[in-house]
Image (cartoon, grey):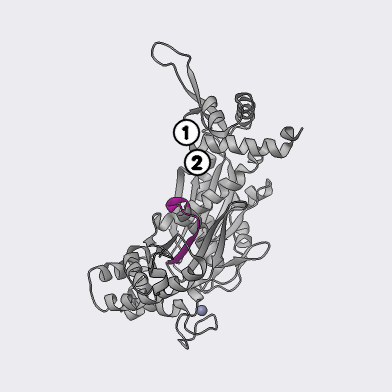
Amino acid sequence: MPLATPDVRRHNLGLVLGRVLEGAGEARADIAAATGLSRGSVTSLVAELIEAGLVEESDVVAPAGMGRPRTTLALAASAPCLVTAMVDADHATAVAATLSGDELARVSLRHGRPMGDPGAIADVLARAIDDVAGELDAAGRRIADVCVVVWAPVDGSPARVLADTDLGWGEVDLLGLLRDRSAALATFEATGGSSRLVPDSSVAALAEHVAVGGDTLLYLKSDSGIGGAIVLTDQDAGVRVIGAALGHLPVVPDGELCACGQHGCLVTVAGPDVLLSRAGLGPLADREGLTVALETFVAQVRAGEEPAASVWRGAAREIARTAQIVALTLGPDVIVLGGFFAALAADVDAVFRGIQPGIARSAAVPVPPVVGSILGADAALHGAQSDARTRLLADPLAI
Ligand SMILES: [Zn+2]
């Protein structure tokens, strides 16, 4: 019988577990109503999830006076957890969270940006991972998924960092370096787990898409270089993310030579290093790190201080031009700016609206709004967690 196949059962287990993760405090009958599964199926699927240590019954509340007590379901307190690690231009961070996304532990260490020395950064990231894993271990919880997020393009199998200009890296097998340094990662992989390496723009775009809604989203962000991604919703294939090197869209004809070999890339006229240097904040970046220098830059722009304000006006034009080129081909519902662009998104939106051709300004083609990121610095971490959850829900008993 088709309904009895293992595939269908796996799918239904994921459906029920997903419902438990989202709708805290629901009873079996609520889950049956929400998923369209029969009460009998839900009862048997829940029994399997309880047996697997993923779900527990809780809050048996007897309504005052009449009616039967109600048994609600929740994620088991000892259920396996997600570990997400991230390297940015200044920090190595590891976060442990439940399958529902509740944060349990976070360790963020400054790595000091040792240019061209991936091993030194892997040392710091491995320490952060082992620290959060230690906290999970102490609480009696196992790791279900490890995802490492980098601010750089990723490709290959096994996945490697292709190049990270912020850190002076060429191609780097970061997972390999971590495996040699992190006892927790080595143990996780030795017991059948497989860790993943993902670029931050793609997972951040996914998280923003969940936060703002719509079908098609264009994401453009800058914290160090400039990255981008496009999220598409397809009725059959679901949500797809395409990484897009929007920082290297050549927006200035015959412009300055970029490190990528092209001329006039967006990053050569709107990248953080260029803007900070033009605004006289290069020494601050060297001393205090990019994050602090960019916060100062944003504060100066908002206060109308020169030269930051006019440096930004020029950059906003180029960012808007890039958004225009992509928007005319892609037709996004919304354009989300992340990283330090987020706080200044209204400026880009104003320019973007002003440079639309007549056809787009007319009612025939709606001009998408340019908005700042809702999730801020944690967008990539949230996106990586939600991506991990989606994959784990595809086969809950393997968690
Ligand atoms: Zn380039």
Does the magenta-highlighted stretch encompass residue 111? no
Q: Position of residue 74 (x, y in %)?
A: 51, 31
Disc 1 packing (10 Å; few <14; some 14–19; many ≥20): few
Quarter of the C terminus within the rendering = top right
Specify whether 63 is left or right of 52.
left
Q: Which residue is mark 1?
A: 24
Disc 2 packing (10 Å; few <14; some 14–19; many ≥20): some
Q: Position of residue 32 (x, y in %)?
A: 56, 29
Specify whether 350 is left or right of 107.
left
Q: Which residue is mark 2?
A: 100
Q: In this view, which residue lies farthest toward the bottom?
A: 254
Residue 176 makes an appearance in the image: yes
| Spatial separation of the CA atoms under disc 1 and disc 2 | 10 Å
Query: Tag 2 or tag 1, which sits nearer the N-term?
Result: 1
Q: What amino acid is labelled 2 in the image?
A: Ser
The tally of labels here is 2
- The one nearer the camera, 381 or 115, is 381
Q: Position of residue 191 (x, y in %)?
A: 68, 45
SS category of the residue bearing label 2: loop
Residue 240 is labelled as none
Is the residue under label 2 in contact with that under label 1 (CB below 8 Å)?
Answer: yes
First to last magenta residue range: 210-222
Q: What amino acid is labelled 1 in the image?
A: Ala
Name the residue at 28% across, 76% down: 308
Q: Position of residue 343 (x, y in %)?
A: 33, 63
